[in-house]
Amino acid sequence: MALNPKKHEMPTQAPEVRAHNFKEVALGYPVEIAIEEANRCLNCKNRPCVAGCPVNVDIPGFIMKIKTGDFEGAYQVINETSSLPAVCGRVCPQETQCESKCSMGIRFEPVGIGRLERFVADWHNAHATEKAAAPEPNGHKVAIVGSGPSGLTCAGDLAKKGYSVSVFEALHTAGGVLIYGIPEFRLPKRIVAKEVETLKELGVDIETNVVIGKTLTIDELFEMGYEAVFIGSGAGLPNFMNIPGESLKGVYSANEFLTRSNLMKAYLDDPKTPIQKGGKVAVVGGGNVAMDAARTALRLGAEHVYIVYRRSMDELPARREEVEHAMEEGIDFRLLNNPVEILGYRNPDDPRDPKNGFVTGMRCIRMELGEPDAKGRRRPVPIPGSEFTLDVDTVVIAIGTSPNPLIKNTTAGLEVNSHGGIIVSEDGLTSRKNVYAGGDAVTGAATVISAMGAGKIAAKAIDEALRQ
C-alpha cells in the first residue's frame, strides 16, 4: 500500500463557532484515522525522532503499538519516559522537535507524532480503570517547588523510584502554567487534573497555597527533613515595554489577563475576579502567549482583536498552527508595527480614578527589517514619520516573562544570571548543595517539553546523589 504523503488533518471546531466558546478547538483523531496515520511511520532503525524529543519518548515503539490496535500498550510505552502525555500531545511544538527529525519529512510531510500522542493519552484516560500503583518507599524525601511541567515531571520520575515527594504550589490549584497560562480551548483543565491525579496515585503529596520564600524557605524545607529540593517555580514575572501609558486602567500583562480568565474564571457572568470584556483589544507580541491572549479576548466578547508585532510573519515565534487558528478566527495581525505610547484619559468625577485613567488608544510606529541581530534575526527599525493610532480600549502586553526573584532573594548562596535565571550545571544542580532547578526558573520562558526535560535530568541527578 502506498504511503500517504500528507499527515491526516486534525478535526477542529469550525472557526465561526469556536471563536465564541472556550471548548477545545482540536477534536482529536478518531481510531481509524489514528491507525492510518501510524501506518505512515517508517519505523526507522536510527530513530531520529527520539533524538528530537527532549524527554526521549520511544516514538517508533508507541506508534508500532497503535498500528496493531494496542492503544493501552502505546500509552505504557510513552509513560515510561513522559509523565504528561495528554498535555504534550496538545501543546508541545512537535514541528520543531520530534517531527522535524522524522524521516518521512525528507520527501513528504512528517508523521503526526503529537497528534498520535494525544490520541493515545486520551484513549487511556477514557478507558483505563486501574489506578497507578505506588512503588515501595525507599526512605528518601524530596521537595519540589512549583507544580508546573518541570516540577510535575521531576516529581513523577522520583515517585516511580520510591521517593517520598512533596510538591509545593503557590496557587490554589496544581498545574502551574498548564492551569493559569494555557487557555481551556487549547488545553482543557480536566486533562491537567487527570495528570495530577495520576501523580497522586503514585504517592506524590501536593501542597497548594504555599509560597516558597514567604510561607516556607528553602532552608526550612531541609530542616523539615527533605534531603533535596528541586526548584521549578517558572517565569512568572511579566516584562513590560516601559512606554508611556502602561499604568492606565485596561492595560494587562498577558500573565494577569490569562490567569484571570483561566484560573479565576473571569469569563463567568458574575466572576469574583473581574476582567475587562468586549471593546477593541490590542495584544502586543508574537509568541504563543500572545496568540492565547488574543484568542481569549475574542472569546470574552471583544468586537475586534489586534496582534501588534514589530517583525514580519516569517519571524513570528508562535507555533504555526496557533497562528493559523488565530487568523481563521478573525484576529487582525498588524505586523511590522511597534507601540510607542498607550493613550488614555482621566475622569476627575470618578472616585475609582484617582491617579490613572482608562485606555483610549495605542500609538504605534511602522517598522522595517534591517540588519540581523545577535540571534540572526533581522532587527526591526522604526520608519520616521510613520506613526498612527489604533482605536483600542484594552491592551495586553505579551512580550515575555522573567523568573520571579522571590526564591533567589530569600535563599542565601543561590547564584543567578543577569536575567534572574538560576544558574545550574548540566544535571540541574545549583550553587547550593542538594538544591536543583530547571524549566523557566532557569531558562526564562520556554516550552512545556523543554521544562519537562529539565525535570527529568534533575530527577536522575537527585536519585544518583541520594543513593550514594
Image (spheres, rainbow, N blue to C red):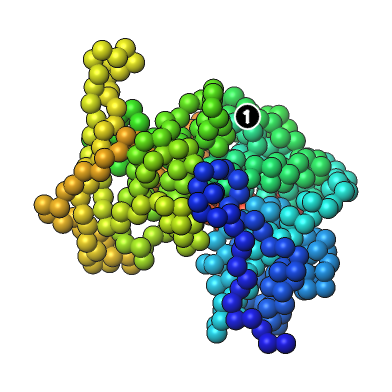
Extreme residue in the bottom direction: 1
- Residue drawn at 38 percent across, 45 percent down: 305
Relative placement, left or right, of 68 versus 423 is right
Q: Nearer the viewer, residue 117 or 440?
A: 117
Residue 366 x %, y %: 21, 54
Residue 65 appears in view: yes
Q: Is residue 418 visible?
A: no
Q: How many marks?
A: 1
The percent position of residue 270, horizontal first and vertical second, equals 54, 23
Q: Residue furthest front?
A: 16
In this rendering, is residue 453 above or below 67? above
Q: Quadrant of residue 14?
A: bottom right
The residue under the point 41% across, 39% down is 302
Residue at the disc numbered 1? 172
Q: Residue at x 72, y 77 (%)?
A: 39
Looking at numbered disc 1 in the image, what kind of residue is underneath it? His
